[in-house]
Amino acid sequence: ALAAPPTLPEGVTLAPLRDGVDDAALIQANNAAFADHPEQGGWSPAELEIRRAAPWYDPTDVLLAWWGQHLLGFHWTKRHPPGQRELAGVARLGEVYVLAVHPRAQGMGLGRALLRAGVARLAERGCSDAALYVDVGEPAVSLYEREGFETARVHRCYVGHELGSDGRRAAT
């Protein structure tokens, strides 16, 4: 089953992304939320344009959480093409593509509200299930588990530290 309806923090409203209007706010919120993430942080306008060029991109699938003129976070959802079978038994898969909460808005329930709103959007668009990818050490894991997400598979990434010019590990 997909998530329960969202309850937004007081004074926060949701609106879809307006291409060309909300770009700077989206990039700033993303970069603040993922300041220490090697892939998700450090977006530029060019990076945003690359993601917008994807065939599945739809600005109405990017939900922005505003408090007045301040963007506090967003949930960018992704609908996988019908018939794409990433998970067994799933009729139409949707994805929590990016769930970002600005550090100044963390701890007020906004992540949960955005997650629920995005998953509801996926259901409205015909998705039967939602998937996501998250770093295992992230605090978001407990949110996803509380909202009913379960581990489907685990990927590992290995990093070699302090490599020398010959590609071998440098002496420490």
Image: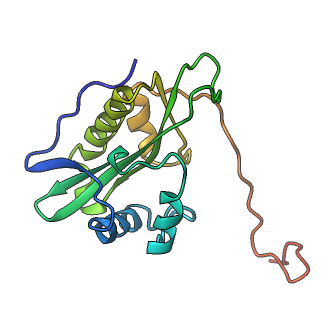
Q: Is residue 105 left or right of residue 28?
A: left
Q: Position of residue 169 (x, y in %)?
A: 85, 72
Instruction: Please identify the quarter of the rendering in which residue 29 is found.
Output: bottom left
> Residue at position x 33%, y 25% from top?
3
Task: Tell me the quarter of the picture where residue 147 sits.
Answer: top left
Asked if residue 61 is positioned above or below residue 34 in the image, the reply reads above
Q: Quadrant of the N terminus?
A: top left
Q: Quadrant of residue 105?
A: bottom left
Q: Position of residue 85 (x, y in %)?
A: 65, 27
- Quadrant of the drawing holding the C terminus: bottom right
Q: Residue 96: horizontal and vertical position, in percent?
A: 45, 41
Position above or below: 150 against 19: above
Where is residue 22 shown, x and y percent of the image? 28, 65
Q: Is residue 126 left or right of residue 53?
A: left
Looking at the picture, does residue 63 appear above or below residue 112? below
Q: Nearer the viewer, residue 138 or 54?
A: 54
Q: Residue at x 74, y 55 (%)?
A: 158
Most distant residue in the left direction? 11
| Residue 152 versus residue 51 in the image, above or below | above
Evaluate whether residue 44 shows in this view. Answer: no
Is 161 on the left or on the right of 46, as rendered?
A: right
